[in-house]
Image (cartoon, rainbow, N blue to C red):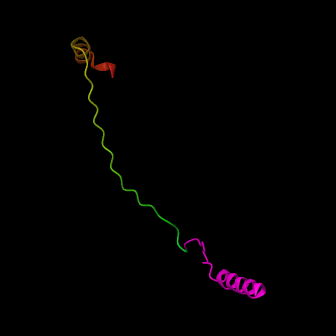
Amino acid sequence: MKITIAMLGLLATTLLSGCTPRIEVAAPKEPITINMNVKIEHEIHIKVDKDVENLLKSRSDLF
């Protein structure tokens, strides 16, 4: 009786091991392209003292 149970267990294990999923990893045939059309806009606000503002207005050759 024990041999029959052992044989059934071995048979079940053998049958279930044949049902393992197969995973395949393959590279694509054509290259991967990433299209990045990005528009970046900046806006910078600077707050200065009145003395510095007057200096910048009077001496435009600084910058």
Quadrant housing the C terminus: top left
**Nearer to us in this view, 13 or 18:** 13
**Nearer to us in this view, 42 or 7:** 7
Q: Is residue 60 left or right of residue 2?
A: left
**Nearer to us in this view, 58 or 15:** 15
**Nearer to us in this view, 2 or 45:** 2
Q: Position of residue 50 (x, y in %)?
A: 21, 13
Range of the magenta residues?
A: 1-28
Q: Position of residue 62 (x, y in %)?
A: 33, 19
Residue drawn where x is 41% and y is 60% of the image: 35
Residue 20 to residue 60: above or below: below
Q: Is residue 20 left or right of residue 3?
A: left
Q: Is residue 17 left or right of residue 61?
A: right
Q: Quadrant of residue 28?
A: bottom right
Residue drawn where x is 27% and y is 20% of the image: 60
Q: Quadrant of residue 23?
A: bottom right
Q: Is residue 18 magenta?
A: yes
Q: Is residue 20 magenta?
A: yes
Residue 40 to residue 28: above or below: above
Residue drawn where x is 66% and y is 83% of the image: 18
Residue furthest to the right in view is 3
Quadrant housing the N terminus: bottom right
